[in-house]
Image (cartoon, helix red, strand yellow):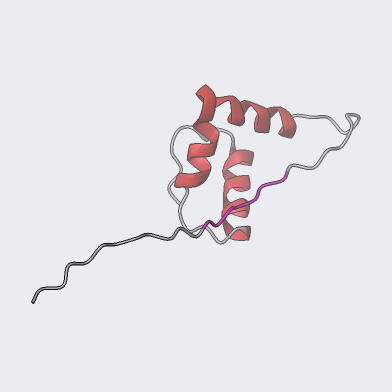
Amino acid sequence: MNIVVIMDDLRIEWLCGRVNDSLDVHQNDDFEELLSRNDGHAELMISDYLNQTTDDTHQPLIFYKLVLEQDEEIEVECGK
């Protein structure tokens, strides 16, 4: 598994692997893109979540994947 520098926390690297396996994603590009959104805001939010103590209120961390089908209209010329 090739992890870029953005994931310097081993817990985030582990989480990336579990999320990718669960969502049947075969490359890290989507997770890395998630972490880099809004100047790394998502990575900070995940880090904060992972750094919560057991005394903090428990909230789930949910990842999901949207699969959208798109129709593409193609115009084909038929020769005579």
Q: Is residue 32 shown left or right of residue 64?
A: left
Vertical order, 16 against 58 (above or below): below
Residue 19 vs residue 12, the one in the foreground: 19
Q: Residue at x 87, y 37 (%)?
A: 58
Q: Residue at x 72, y 45 (%)?
A: 62
Vertical order, 32 against 71 (above or below): above
**Residue segment shown in magenta:** 62-68
Split into 4 quadrants, where in the image is the C terminus? bottom left
Q: Residue furthest left?
A: 80
Q: Residue at x 66, y 47 (%)?
A: 63
Q: Is residue 79 shown left or right of residue 75?
A: left
Residue 66 falls inside the magenta stretch: yes
Vertical order, 17 against 32 (above or below): below
Image coordinates for residue 29, horizontal then vertical, percent: 45, 46
Image coordinates for residue 55, horizontal then vertical, percent: 91, 30
Q: Residue at x 58, y 53 (%)?
A: 66
Residue 33 vs residue 9, the one in the foreground: 33
Quadrant of residue 35 in the image?
Answer: top right
Q: Main secondary structure of the magenta part?
A: loop
Quadrant of residue 13 in the image?
Answer: top right
Residue 38 vs residue 32, the one in the foreground: 38
Residue 28 falls inside the magenta stretch: no
Image coordinates for residue 51, horizontal then vertical, percent: 74, 29
Q: Residue furthest top?
A: 39
Q: How many marks?
A: 0
Q: Residue furthest bottom?
A: 80
